[in-house]
Image (cartoon, grey):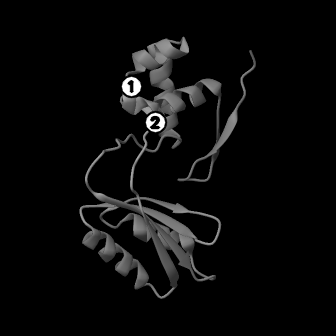
């Protein structure tokens, strides 16, 4: 069986990295449950635990895996805040600034009518509004649109 490789852009130093089908399968399993033991992943994929461990270590060093996280189910207010910015503005600079805000869990630069989407997870609608007002204070922010998250669906690993 011939290995097929996929290009991954390492965001930290703009190096293109190649991963094969086994790496992709390991990533898919870990996306569903980042706490899954390497022994279990190895068993599911028919390889040794050492193979899984070394590949995860290498993908972490290369920046393909940028962190291990958990998803929580809480009573917090969660929202997508869509941000439209002025044409001659450094989108990356604004995105990095937003990612440092307390309560902002993820920030994406996107295509379409909006330029940035921030995922916000805060204790109250007042906290959400404070973040939105803070964003709107930037001179180069043209508009924001907020979508409250009503229900979350995490995938198969949550049904265990």
Residue drawn at x 30%, y 45% is: 73
Residue lying at the far right of the rendered structure:
2
Q: Name the residue under label 1.
A: 36
- Mark linked to residue 148: none
Q: Do the residues labelled 2 and 1 touch (CB within 8 Å)?
A: no
Q: Where is residue 22 in the image (x, y as percent from the top left)?
A: 60, 23
Q: Can residue 7 be seen in this view?
A: yes
Q: Quadrant of residue 109?
A: bottom right
Q: Name the residue under label 2.
A: 155
Circle 2: element type: loop
Q: Is residue 34 visible?
A: no
Residue drawn at x 31%, y 44% is: 72
Determine the CA span between mark 2 and mark 1.
15 Å
Q: Position of residue 95 (x, y in %)?
A: 48, 68
Most foreground residue, 63 or 107: 107
Most foreground residue, 6 or 129: 129
Circle 1: element type: loop
Residue drawn at x 72%, y 28% is: 4
Q: Is residue 125 above or below residue 10?
A: below
Q: Quadrant of the C terminus?
A: top left
Q: In which quarter of the image is the N terminus?
A: top right
Question: Tag 1: Cα neighbours inside 10 Å, few (<14), some, or many (≥20)?
Answer: few
């Amino acid at each position: 069986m011939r290995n097929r490789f996929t290009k991954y852009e390492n965001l930290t130093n703009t190096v293109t990295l190649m991963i094969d089908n086994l790496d992709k399968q390991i990533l898919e399993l870990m996306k569903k449950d980042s706490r899954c033991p390497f022994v279990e992943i190895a068993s599911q994929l028919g390889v040794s635990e050492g193979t899984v461990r070394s590949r995860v270590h290498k993908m972490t060093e290369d920046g393909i895996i940028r962190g291990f996280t958990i998803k929580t189910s809480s009573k917090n207010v969660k929202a997508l805040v869509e941000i439209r910015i002025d044409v001659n503005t450094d989108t990356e600079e604004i995105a990095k600034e937003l990612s440092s805000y307390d309560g902002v869990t993820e920030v994406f630069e996107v295509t379409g009518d909006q330029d940035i989407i921030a995922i916000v997870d805060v204790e109250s609608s007042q906290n959400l509004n404070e973040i939105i007002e803070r964003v709107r204070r930037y001179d180069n922010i043209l508009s924001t649109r907020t979508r409250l998250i009503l229900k979350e669906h995490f995938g198969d690993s949550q049904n265990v």
